[in-house]
């Protein structure tokens, strides 16, 4: 029985590897090295628009857990859309470094009373933030999660991730202004969270270290056009129109602007974000202080189960964010 299960596991893994290799071959043919000519001007003007909406925030609720106070904060952002973050701050007076963790793509937690007193949030001597971008988690009062990936996909100006990326940047602005902040900031996340960590690091000069594990939207020309997420992204538009739109939201194009220490781990065979795309993002990072660890596993997120990957990430953060 055990032998049969092992044979089945090997067969499934082999099938995944074959499909991945076929996808990478197709990706290599489609990949375009030329950055969209108005990429920088588009995002610079978007940041200027963001700054026209005041950075205002409100504490909705709070609760103490040991040495930390965890609060739910409502923050005003791009186009006067608000989003929510959970902030865990040391109760003791002082100035502290900050870690911002962006959630992966999902409907997320919608329980207003579920204070996330997780290991990440309870780190000592650190301001810890968990972010619900617009349309996800608690941040659905103005924009819903339904059809998120195709929301506004007819133009770069209206696409949902334009505002979501501004939420990622505004979180950095918020924490840097916090009275207990020493202005040292690390962004971190996996999948969509990794994408948002990259974007925040590219668009804000206040970020000191970026950790982006198996980041979403890593060279979207590598993605299978007939599977999720591309089938959702291109609803109502053609595949070519989707690729032209996504040039403005691709992690590889933001990576060019990152000149700070960068760490990433990923699977060798990822069924959503192919390794080749993640390697292109990594190659585009403009610093020698970077590390990519590839785990010999198959699946989106399986590298998070690797003790080696976990330890390497911990060591990297200790080296560059202490």
Image (spheres, rainbow, N blue to C red):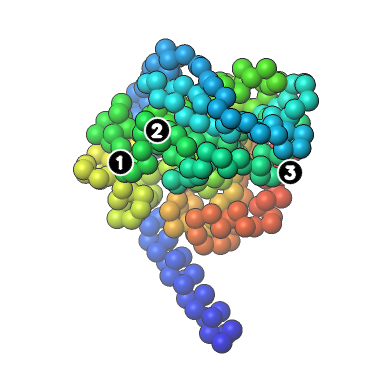
Quadrant hosting residue 107: top left
Residue placed most toward the observer, 145 or 258: 145
Residue placed most toward the observer, 229 or 121: 121
Q: CA distance from mark 2 to mark 1?
A: 18 Å
Q: Residue at x 76, y 37 (%)?
A: 66
The circle on residue 141 is: 2
Expressed as whole percent of the image width and height from the top left, the position of residue 146 reads 33, 43
Expressed as whole percent of the image width and height from the top left, the position of residue 23 reads 38, 57
Residue 50 in the figure: left or right of residue 176: left
Q: Are marks 2 and 1 in contact (CB under 8 Å)?
A: no
Q: Are marks 3 and 1 in contact (CB under 8 Å)?
A: no
Residue most extreme to the bottom: 1
**Counting other residues with Cα less than 10 Å from the Cα at mark 3, is it few (<14), some (14-19), or many (20 or more)?**
few
Q: CA distance from mark 3 to mark 2?
A: 39 Å
Q: Which residue is mark 1?
A: 150
Expressed as whole percent of the image width and height from the top left, the position of residue 181 reads 68, 21
Say if 27 sits above or below 144 in the image. below
Secondary structure of residue under mark 2: loop
Q: Residue at x 55, y 27 (%)?
A: 60
Quadrant the C terminus occupies:
top right
Secondary structure of residue under mark 3: helix
Quadrant the N terminus occupies:
bottom right
Q: Which marked residue is nearer to the observer: mark 3 or mark 2?
A: 2
The reply to whether residue 164 is in sight is: yes
Residue placed most toward the observer, 120 or 281: 120
Q: Residue at x 58, y 42 (%)?
A: 114
Of pointers 2 and 1, the one earlier in the residue sequence: 2
Of pointers 3 and 2, the one earlier in the residue sequence: 2
Q: Which residue is mark 3?
A: 315
């Amino acid at each position: 029985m055990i032998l049969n299960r092992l044979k089945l596991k090997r067969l499934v893994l082999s099938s995944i590897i074959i499909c991945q290799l076929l996808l990478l071959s197709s990706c290599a043919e489609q990949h375009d090295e030329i950055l969209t000519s108005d990429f920088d001007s588009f995002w610079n003007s978007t940041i200027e628009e963001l700054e026209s909406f005041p950075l205002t925030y409100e504490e909705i609720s709070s609760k103490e857990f040991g040495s930390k106070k965890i609060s739910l904060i409502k923050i005003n952002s791009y186009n006067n859309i608000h989003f929510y973050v959970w902030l865990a701050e040391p109760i003791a007076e002082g100035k502290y470094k900050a870690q911002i963790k962006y959630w992966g793509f999902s409907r997320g937690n919608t329980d207003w009373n579920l204070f996330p007193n997780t290991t990440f949030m309870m780190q000592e001597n650190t301001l810890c933030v968990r972010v619900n971008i617009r349309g996800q988690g608690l941040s659905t009062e103005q924009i819903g999660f339904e059809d998120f990936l195709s929301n506004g996909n007819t133009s770069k100006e209206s696409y949902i991730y334009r505002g979501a990326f501004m939420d990622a940047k505004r979180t950095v602005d918020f924490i840097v202004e916090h009275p207990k902040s020493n202005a040292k900031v690390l962004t971190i996340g996996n999948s969509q969270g990794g994408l948002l960590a990259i974007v925040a690091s590219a668009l804000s000069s206040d970020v000191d270290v970026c950790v982006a594990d198996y980041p979403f939207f890593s060279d979207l020309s590598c993605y299978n056009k007939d599977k999720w997420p591309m089938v959702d992204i291109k609803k109502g538009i053609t595949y070519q129109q989707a690729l032209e739109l996504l040039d403005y939201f691709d992690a590889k194009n933001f990576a060019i602007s990152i000149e700070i220490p960068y760490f990433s781990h990923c699977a060798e065979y990822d069924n959503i974000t192919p390794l080749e795309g993640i390697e292109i993002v990594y190659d585009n990072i403009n610093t020698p202080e970077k590390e990519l660890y590839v785990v010999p596993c198959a699946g989106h997120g399986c590298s998070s189960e690797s003790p080696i990957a976990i330890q390497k990430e911990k060591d990297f953060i200790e080296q560059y964010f202490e």
